[in-house]
Image (tube, rainbow, N blue to C red):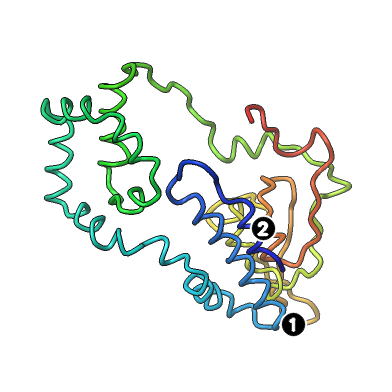
Amino acid sequence: MLVGDAAGQMQAQGPIIKGMNHAVTAGALAAEAFADAKSRGSPHQAGELYESKLYDEGVMDKLRPSNYNIFGKMGELEAVDNISNSLVKSTIGRVGIKLTGGLLERAYSSPTLVSMIPDTKLPYVTLPTVIAEELGERVTDTNTVEPPELDDRIGDLTYDVGEPHIELLDNSFAASGTAVTACPVSAKDFGGGCYRDETVKTNGAEEHLVSLDTQPCVECGTCAVVADTHWEHPAGGKGVDYQQG
């Protein structure tokens, strides 16, 4: 499986968006780990393989590089974070941002400097907001969009009942049970999902099985990786409708 190569081709180019490349790589490695474990007849070892791949492929080192360990962690200390936020929003901080606007722009485009910033509100919210206010046009608009609930969105989906786009090839829980928890609309506390955990009694014996209903499907493709399925895109005009992008 050339999952790693595919992940490499999907890496973002240009200014670094912290975390996006790591997420693509980590997701690809998760699929690769499950495929490897399943091919060895030991799907339960997927988690262990995944952890090994994260370290072997250098993902963990990129998530927490040495620069971050030196500078980022210091910025995550509550006292340091509080002082930094107050300073940036102060008159002195705003004047400094006006004087160093170009420098800040280059800093946010530098992979080295971005890898050092702390995971706090300061670099992701406070500083960009003050930069926009002092160097750009003040934003006064508010978001009035109220996204519909998940069950309302699912209720709007339609598929061909007679020709489902997903076929469950092996409905045993051992082969496809992971889909019950991995599928985003099949959590046990969410009714009406695609995959359901069932125990069926036949001739005095019990079988642990998985049932599938494709009508709530959001076409994420997760079950194509974690379950024994045959997955195809639905017919035109069916399923998820991307109205803006």
* Element assignment for label 1: strand
> Quarter holding the N terminus?
bottom right
Q: Is residue 124 left or right of residue 186?
A: left
What residue is at 48 percent from the left and 24 percent from the top? 145
Residue 115, image x, y percentages: 35, 53
Q: Please identify, in this view, whether the residue under mark 2 or under mark 1 is nearer the observer.
A: 2
**In the rendered image, the vertical position of residue 101 relative to residue 9, given as above or below:** above
What residue is at 18 percent from the left and 34 percent from the top? 88
Q: Residues within 10 Å of mark 2 (few under 14, many from 20)?
A: few
**In the rendered image, the vertical position of residue 137 relative to residue 71, given as above or below:** above
Front in this rendered view, residue 142 or 213: 142
Q: Residues within 10 Å of mark 1 (few under 14, many from 20)?
A: few
Kindly indicate whether the residue at mark 1 contacts the one at mark 2 (C-beta within 8 angstroms): no
**In the rendered image, the vertical position of residue 111 relative to residue 107, given as above or below:** below
Residue 149, image x, y percentages: 53, 36
The amino acid beneath tag 1 is Ala
Q: Earlier in the sequence, mark 2 or mark 1?
A: 2
Occupied quadrant, residue 173: bottom right
Occupied quadrant, residue 175: bottom right
The amino acid beneath tag 2 is Ala
Tell me the distance, in whole angstroms, between the alpha carbons under discs 2 and 1: 45 Å
Q: Is residue 229 left or right of residue 181?
A: right
Query: Which numbered tag is attached to residue 6?
Result: 2
Front in this rendered view, residue 233 or 113: 113
What residue is at 66 percent from the left and 37 percent from the top? 155
> Quarter holding the C terminus?
top right
What residue is at 60 percent from the left and 79 percent from the top? 44
Which residue was labeled with disc 1?
205
Occupied quadrant, residue 110: top left
* Element assignment for label 2: helix
